[in-house]
Structures are given as structure tokens and as C-alpha cells.
Image: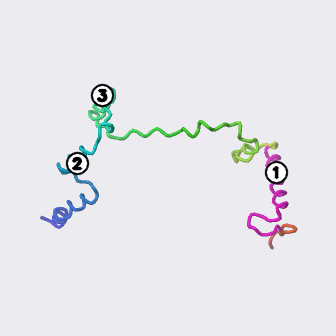
């Protein structure tokens, strides 16, 4: 018997037990079965039984992806989205003079609002005039 076989014979059961990879003992299985209530049991439909048999016969053991929860989408309304958002979130390659003018207008408006507050996003007072290009 080589070293690897000795290792797995000695520690394999311990490793499987700590990782819960061991099958249940008869006592553990009975305890789990007794813990189930009748409310937890839902009988399979004939279609589900047939589908399970088909998967076993074709050896298709991949789990079916869960359907995404799209309940949050039902309250969404595209009418609430402002045209400004569409102007700001366009594709980089989409050149449009009207959109560019609207973006410039929004930037100026944001800059004016920032000046009105007297502070910028850093919390420091806005400078009288922006610094020139470094040199």
C-alpha cells in the first residue's frame, strides 16, 4: 500500500464527514424523515415524474436554471424617464448635433447649480475662475 492509499484510508472518512459528503447513517436518515411534516410533502405530477425518468435515462443531471424574479419590473414605467437621461446615456459612436447641444446645456446647468451652492463635490468653495492648463 503506497502513501496516498494510506492517507485516504486513514483520513478520507474524516474529511468526507466534515464536508458532509458522507451518506446519512440509517439513524440520521430516519431522523430527517421524521422531521418532515405532511405540509412539506408535495406529490409530483405525472409530468414531473415522466420528466425525471427521462432525465435519468438520458443522463441529463444538470439542474435547470431558476427563472429570474421579474416582479420588480411590473412597477416600472418608461414614461418617468426624462429625455435628458436618453441624451446622456447614448452610445459613444452615436453622433447627433441635437444630443450634443442638449448634453452641453445640461453640463452648463449642472455647473451653474454647483456655482449657486458655493461648494463643489469636494466640499470646498468653488474657485473664482478655473485654473489654467498646467505647464
Task: Report, in whole angstroms, how far the alpha carbon at label 1 lies from the one at label 3.
Answer: 62 Å
Query: Which numbered disc, 1 or 3, marks the residue closer to the eye?
Result: 3
Query: Which numbered disc, 1 or 2, marks the residue closer to the eye?
Result: 2
> Which of the marked residues, 3 or 2, is nearer the chain's N terminus?
2
The location of residue 53, given as percent across then percent down, is: 27, 31
- Whether 131 is drawn above or below 65: the answer is below
Q: Residue at x 50, y 40 (%)?
A: 69
Q: Is 49 part of what is drawn in magenta?
A: no
Q: Secondary structure at mark 1?
A: helix
Looking at the rendering, in which quadrant would you find the N terminus?
bottom left
Q: Is 108 part of what is drawn in magenta?
A: yes
Looking at the rendering, in which quadrant would you find the C terminus?
bottom right
The location of residue 42, given as percent across then percent down, is: 32, 34
Q: Residue at x 87, y 67 (%)?
A: 129
Magenta residues span 99-126
- Give the camera-side residue of 99 and 64: 64
Circle 3 sits on which residue?
50
Q: In the shown orientation, is residue 13 left or right of residue 111?
A: left
- Give the camera-side residue of 43 and 2: 43
The location of residue 56, given as percent across then percent down, is: 27, 35
Report crowding for label 1: few under 14, some 14 to 19, many 20 or more residues within 10 A (C-alpha). Answer: few
- Whether 49 is drawn above or below 131: the answer is above
The location of residue 114, given as percent across then percent down, is: 81, 60
Considering every residue shown, the one lying at the far top of the view is 46
| Mark 3 and mark 2 residues within 8 Å of each other at the beta carbon | no
Q: In the shown orientation, is residue 62 left or right of residue 17?
A: right
| Mark 1 and mark 2 residues within 8 Å of each other at the beta carbon | no
Report crowding for label 2: few under 14, some 14 to 19, many 20 or more residues within 10 A (C-alpha). Answer: few
Circle 2 sits on which residue?
31
Circle 1 sits on which residue?
104
Amino acid at each position: 500500500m503506497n502513501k496516498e492509499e494510506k492517507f485516504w484510508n486513514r483520513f478520507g472518512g474524516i474529511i468526507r464527514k466534515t464536508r458532509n459528503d458522507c451518506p446519512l447513517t440509517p439513524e440520521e436518515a430516519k431522523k430527517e424523515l421524521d422531521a418532515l411534516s405532511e405540509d412539506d410533502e408535495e406529490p409530483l405530477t405525472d409530468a414531473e415524474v415522466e420528466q425525471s425518468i427521462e432525465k435519468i435515462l438520458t443522463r441529463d443531471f444538470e439542474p435547470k436554471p431558476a427563472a429570474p424574479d421579474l416582479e420588480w419590473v411590473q412597477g416600472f414605467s418608461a414614461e418617468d424617464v426624462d429625455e435628458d437621461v436618453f441624451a446622456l446615456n447614448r452610445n459613444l459612436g452615436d453622433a447627433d448635433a441635437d444630443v450634443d447641444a442638449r448634453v452641453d446645456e445640461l453640463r452648463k446647468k449642472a455647473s451653474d447649480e454647483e456655482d449657486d451652492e458655493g461648494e463643489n463635490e469636494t466640499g470646498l468653495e468653488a474657485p473664482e475662475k478655473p485654473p489654467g492648463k498646467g505647464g
